[in-house]
Image (cartoon, rainbow, N blue to C red):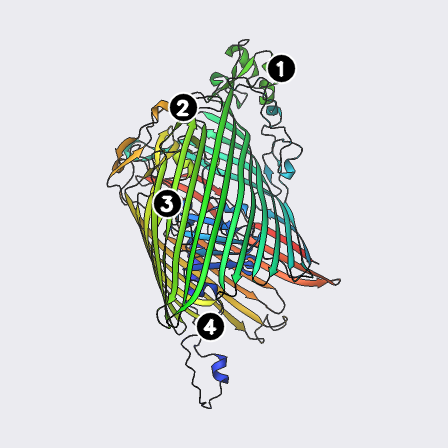
Amino acid sequence: MTKAQNKFLALLLLGSALSVPELATAQDAAADPTPTSDEVIATGVFIPNEKRITSEITSVLDEEVFAQIGAGDIASALTRVTGLSLNRGKFVIARGLNERYANATLNGSPLPSPEPLRRVAPLDLFPTSVLSDAVVSKTFDPEFSGEFGGAAIALSTKALPDERFLELTVSASANTETSLRKGFLYGGSDTDWLGFDDGLRDLPALDAAGIPTANLESFSTLIVDNEDNIPFNGGFRVSAGDRYDLDGGQSIGVLATLGYDNSWETRRATDNTAVIGANDTLEVRNQFVRTSTENSIALNGLLTVGVEFDPDNTVEVVGLMTRQSSAEARVVAGLNRDGDPVRNDFTEWFEREVYLGQVFGEHFLSGFNDAQISWRAMYAQAGREAPYERFVGYIDEPGDADGFVFEVARFGQSNNRTNFSQLDDETIDAGLDFEIPFDLTDREVTLKLGGAYLDKSRDTEEISYFYEPGQASNRADLLLFRTARIDQLFSDTLFDANFTTISSAGSVGFPRVSDTGLEVMAGYASLESEITRDLRVSAGFRYEDSTQTTLVRQTPFSTQEFRFDDLEDSYALPAATLTYTFGDWQMRLAASKTINRPQFRELTPSEFRNTETEDIFIGNPFLQNSEAINLDGRLEYYFGANQFITIGGFYKDLTNPIEEFVFDEADGNITTSFLNAPSAEVFGLELEFEKTFAIPANIPLFENLMGGQDFVVRSNYTYVDSSVSADGTVNILSNSAANLSQISAPNVVNAAGLYTDGRRLQGQSDHLANVQIGVKNVDAGWDAFLLLNYSSDRIRVVESLSDRAPAVIEQLPLSLDLVVNVPFDMGGGDYEFGFKVQNILDDDYKATQEAGGTEIVIDGYDIGTTFSASLKRRF
């Protein structure tokens, strides 16, 4: 444990030891002691807290919390929620279960995803500036999708304004590892700064076999350039809205926001591979240093138009656009397994985008006991384009004074590659919900009924090319160009003279094209009622019928296709929650059954490369749906609005959980695939504490500040343990499959030969903790918070028993941040200044393998400290 982690745990204990307030209130002290003829007995105190009044076990983040924690996107905001952490900074791990078990919705509709490796949406794409709140439910309710395991994350867009407003915000930031330091750049198109390519990266015309008829001309510009100083990050946001009251009593509200952000990140990382050597000790096979610079352009916009026909009937239309483009130049240099100095250059351009249109309405039937009808419809498209993913290999041969030169001896697929890939994701969602309250034997009862339809489809394709000697050349001739720049070696002149030629790398091996789909029809019914004055029950079930399809082709230009058996299932999923209230205390007990379906990439037997780690994933078309039994309990004590202390526990019994395993490990390069493990168990403990203390005016440093100050403490801790069983057989894809005809039947093997029985779930940290300590002045509107976030180590890549390769364990940085927001008036205008410091402790990231008493760093880099400032002007 590092010194920073010791300091964090000490501070966590201090925050947890803060005293619970006196039960007596100021209202008790001021109460009139004179008895009256009417006696009122209070069994509880009404506290307007969504966390308390919902049937499910929930956590709530609203606009005030977003500002206090300084979260620019919803992914980073969710790390402050009990039991939640992130994978790759954008995918939620809830209660030790990876992103597969967490679903996210926007105004009730599922979010589409532009990620090739996941069906779930990357939440870093969704800025908090377009959201009003996020409600995280950790127990299943039949209103949710049946694909529930760790959490359901319900995002809501901003409410329509009550009056006209305009806000302008500008921001800037700098990072100690990136800003004004040398970083790799490469030339791109003239519109890269907008996040759009102007056509420079378009693929040339292709012949019938899919081979370019012209040179890949963008090569001359898309190469790693000399190092240069990296600029500061910057961005802006414009938000405006208005409300129009019509003569007929109707009202129309309009809200629009547009944001732009330009950021840079440089990483200087250790990049090693290791193998088990003599005497069962771990040895380094490839020893590299990876230096990369990524420029990300984020562009997002929201337009909402709502009509209030009368107080009981409203309809809203929402349009959301969010996209992120990134240009990365990366150099990996070091010693290969033979001890030769090598260098690999990479350039990449990615465009991820989501376009969403949604209409929804709410209608109250005032003549029918205020029954409510809600409906929604959504159409969304998500996409990802990655043109010109470049790789070029160099070598520094012994006794050669020229240094790193193009490796002519391996001129061909092994030392250069140019990939083009594309993903298109389409989602159609519709839902109808009824909420009918009524009285039954003097008890309040609410009946909920509803149905939903979901249709998701995803198409992916990849084309891979490489340069090799043409008919007019031989390798001896090419030695003349071994020290030439790559844009010269692969120039139009040599290509047109047939000195070099372009070949396809996708005619054999795993298929490069997939067409997948998921259709779900669902209906639910639930009943919420008082059993006694202090005991409530919510119980119901959800029925889902689903069909998932997977079709593949070898290349975009081949006609042969193969469709695997459809994955069809129907489920009745029950859920029940008991809530007992006694005074300011509340106890909840919940039980449910839920399912989990394979993600598209997990079913597709195609290769997907993780460009951050260079690891490769291959899907398994023989996966089945998994099931889970969920048990939850939580004891809550509320002593004020948004002030509470809770303790809870949970248990999950998983059948056929989908887990990752090492499919192949050749020369230290890891390829993983997926399987249905026989079973798994997860259990954990969660603690939460939130309290606001009034600071007396005579305290030094606070006595001269305007108004009264409050001292705020929020803290939470989660302990999780899990065990994956290897007792049984599993169906996997044969690693000797080379074409479509060889992937039609599964390879049945013992799970015990692939991974250790009883190992923990991939991505699960034993300990998660957060502490937020701050001061806020409600009257003046300013606040300042210190935020700490801790996650213990977790498995990034599982072990391989067949290759005797230990698991890759990642150690996440301990994060300490400072966030300050100060409103002020200047020249008659309203302003707000924001200041943020992230990773104050300058902790780093590290991933290791360990065996035989030897630990080797596989991946490690410094994150640096980031300083941010923003200025908002309100009109």
Point out the tag, 3 or 4, that comes first from the N-terminus: 4
Give the labeled residue for mark 4.
46
Point out the tag, 4 or 1, that comes first from the N-terminus: 4
In the image, taking residue 129 as reference, residue 721 lies left or right, namely left
Q: Amino acid at mark 1?
A: Thr
Task: Name the mark on residue 509.
Answer: 2
Give the labeled residue for mark 3.
596
Q: Residue furthest front?
A: 367
Q: Are marks 3 and 2 in contact (CB under 8 Å)?
A: no
Point out the tag, 3 or 2, that comes first from the N-terminus: 2
Question: For mark 1, does the 10 Å Cα neighbourhood hold few (<14), some (14 to 19), or many (20 or more) residues?
Answer: few
Question: For mark 4, does the 10 Å Cα neighbourhood hold few (<14), some (14 to 19), or many (20 or more) residues?
Answer: some
Secondary structure category for the residue under label 2: loop
Q: Is residue 395 visible?
A: no
Q: Residue furthest right?
A: 827
Q: Amino acid at mark 3?
A: Asn
Alpha-carbon span between mark 2 and mark 4: 64 Å
- Residue 139 image-quadrant placement: bottom left
Give the labeled residue for mark 1.
493
Secondary structure category for the residue under label 1: helix
Alpha-carbon span between mark 4 and mark 1: 80 Å
Q: Amino acid at mark 4?
A: Phe
Alpha-carbon span between mark 3 and mark 4: 38 Å
Q: Position of residue 728 (x, y in %)?
A: 24, 39
Point out the tag, 2 or 4, that comes first from the N-terminus: 4
